[in-house]
Image: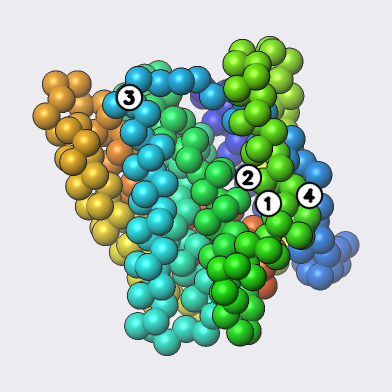
Amino acid sequence: MQAELVLMLSVIIGSLVLGYLARKLGILPVRVSPRITAAAMIWVQPALVALLIWGLEAPGWRTALLPVMAAALMLIMWPVGALVARVQGLAPPQAGAVVSACMFSNLGLTYGAFICYVLLGEQGAALGLIWCSAFTPMLFTVGFIMARRYGHETQQTIRETVLDMLQEPESRNPLLGFALGALLYVLIPHRPELGGQIADVLVPVSTAIYLFAIGLTLRLTSVVTYWRQCVSVGAVKFLLSPVIGLSMAWLAGYVAMEDRALLQVVFIQSAAPAAIMGLVLAQLFDLDEQLANASWLTTNIAAI
């Protein structure tokens, strides 16, 4: 677990720095960044999604509620983020960046699941990863629908959004990967060991590609420009979201359990900072990349 954390943090910091330097030194222009992101989404992400879905293990019913609560929390954060954007009078591209930052959190080994490991040991890490298993299907369905609606000058209907999502390879291919993974999960319940080894390679590779593309567009001054929005997103992530998460945990009966591990995991994961994939959504769907960057940067620094 510690080795994977070191690897992932090295990939995150190294890829961002390389992308940032590539732009600053004039090696690559900013305009290639969306193309790099789209290529990763079309060719790398579908295989990774299929392998991760295929490798899931069936948990007990109480533990199985963790990804359900995670998905519910993401859905609740959509109208919350929309309200924050409306109060601040943001245009659709800025509003979409705020909503995505509110909806999607850093739940994996780069923050949430690792904090669960540090505080609760291997059991916490396993429960933390089960919680974040809802992330991928929610991102490539609800997240894409949300981003498409904010990324157009004129708001699309749900039908138009879904049709576009199924037609364009950036959103269609990951969904096909999800469907393939689900099919393999049903037909061949036990994923071969080679599948796990390939996934272990594709996770850092896909992360590095996304972060290199984001590094090309990274501007630290965006935090100054969007400090009000960053404060609002931080309040949602660190105050409102854990209150909602703990409320769901209470309804699920976690508070009354003698073993508090499930309750603690819900608290940690519902208080996680913004996910890096919010920047990917901004690139793919013409949301405000600098606002997405500022929200991700400030919430993750604050969390650390």
Q: Residue at x 39, y 44 (%)?
A: 70
Marks 1 and 3, the one that precedes in the sequence: 3
Residue type marked 2:
Ile
Residue position for label 2: 12
Q: Are marks 1 and 3 in contact (CB under 8 Å)?
A: no
Residue position for label 3: 61
Q: Say left or right for 60 vs 154.
A: left
Is disc 1 surrounded by few (<14), some (14 to 19) or many (20+) residues within 10 Å? many
Which sits in the foreground, 70 or 239?
70
Marks 1 and 2, the one that precedes in the sequence: 2
- Single out the mark in the foreground, 1 or 3: 3
Residue 21, percent from left and from top: 76, 59
Residue type marked 4:
Ile
Q: Say left or right for 227 vs 45.
A: left
Residue position for label 1: 211
Q: Say left or right for 106 vs 77.
A: right
Q: Residue at x 60, y 59 (%)?
A: 144
Up/down of 17 relative to 286, above or below? above
Q: Are marks 1 and 2 in contact (CB under 8 Å)?
A: yes
Up/down of 198 relative to 99, above or below? above
Q: Are marks 2 and 4 in contact (CB under 8 Å)?
A: no
Q: Which quadrant holds residue 68?
A: top left
Residue type marked 3:
Trp
Residue type marked 1:
Leu
Up/down of 174 relative to 192, above or below? below
| Mark seen at residue 80 | none
* SS for dot 1: helix
Is disc 2 surrounded by few (<14), some (14 to 19) or many (20+) residues within 10 Å? many
